[in-house]
Amino acid sequence: MHERCFLTKKDLLWLIAAVVYNFLIYNLGRYLSGAGVHVDLSTALDHAIPFVPWMILIYWGCYLYWIANYCLGVAWDERGERRMILAHFIGETVCFLTFVLYPTTMVRPQITGDDIWSRLVALTYAVDAADNLLPSIHCFVSWLCWIGVRGNRRIPRWYQAASLVMAVAVCVSTLTVKQHVIADVAAGIILAEVSWLCAGTIGGSRHRAGLGKIKKER
């Protein structure tokens, strides 16, 4: 079994490419769908979820969680398939297509508070329009961060459990700061699971093909 415990230069390049791709599909998706009709998928249950300004801390703080788990997922990929990176590209491509073909929106609350958390939410609303919602990239990436470490024998179980808690917290934060609705969250989670399965199938096929090539050369 091929094992690594460090990031190679190629790994770093793939991680950088993943970040660049994220910003590309998000902004391009917004540009291409800008003139289209946006659908509001809010339900009565969404409206019943309370607005909790302080959870903007989790909403933005999750970037540290993403960095840590993407590095772990890539560095400790036991078969060297970069499955997490492949899943990332698959999922974000689906996000882009959905943003363009089925653009959604939502009505966000008016910010009346003057505390630091309310101000941060207001700033978030100002720089991030209510579009590119389905699926939630925040939820997709956060759930993928947990998938990438779960069941990995080289990563402590307490960290795997903490990653699940953080992924769930991020999903909840997208709802309580009114950046997404339930449909966006569910779609993000499902997309992460499906992308992981697809990446495993593709990576496994490439791995078997590589082993077959080695055997023939021998």
Image (cartoon, rainbow, N blue to C red):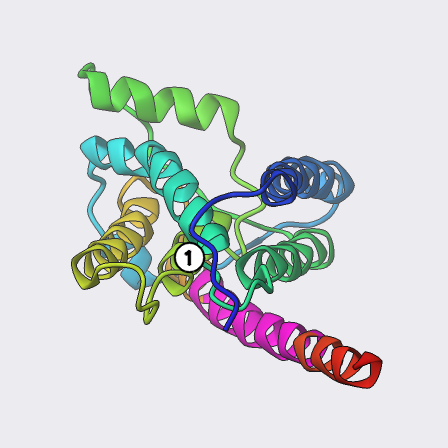
Count all numbered tags in the image, as a single digit: 1
The residue at 47%/51% (across/down) is 75
Q: Is residue 202 magenta?
A: yes
Q: Position of residue 182 (x, y in %)?
A: 37, 60
Q: Residue furthest right?
A: 217
In the image: residue 8, left or right of residue 4: right
In the image: residue 92, left or right of residue 176: right
Report the front residue among 214 and 64. 214
Q: Is residue 43 magenta?
A: no
Q: Residues within 10 Å of mark 1 (few under 14, many from 20)?
A: some
The residue at 22%/23% (across/down) is 117
Vertical arrangement, residue 198 with respect to residue 142, above or below: below
The residue at 63%/79% (across/down) is 201
Highlighted magenta segment, given as a residue range: 187-206
Q: Position of residue 165 (x, y in %)?
A: 21, 56
Magenta residues: mostly which secondary structure?
helix
Vertical arrangement, residue 170 with respect to residue 147, above or below: above
In what quadrant of the picture does the C terminus appear?
Answer: bottom right
Can you tell which quarter of the image residue 144 is in? bottom left
Vertical arrangement, residue 207 with respect to residue 131, above or below: below
Mark 1 lies on a secondary structure that is loop
Query: Residue flagged by tag 1: what amino acid is it?
Result: Ser
Q: Position of residue 199 (x, y in %)?
A: 61, 70
In the image: residue 77, left or right of residue 206: left
Vertical arrangement, residue 198 with respect to residue 167, above or below: below
> Residue 87, can we see it?
yes
Q: Position of residue 134 (x, y in %)?
A: 54, 56
> Residue 112, can we see it?
no
The residue at 41%/43% (across/down) is 66
Q: Mark 1 sits on what residue?
A: 42
Q: Residue furthest front?
A: 218
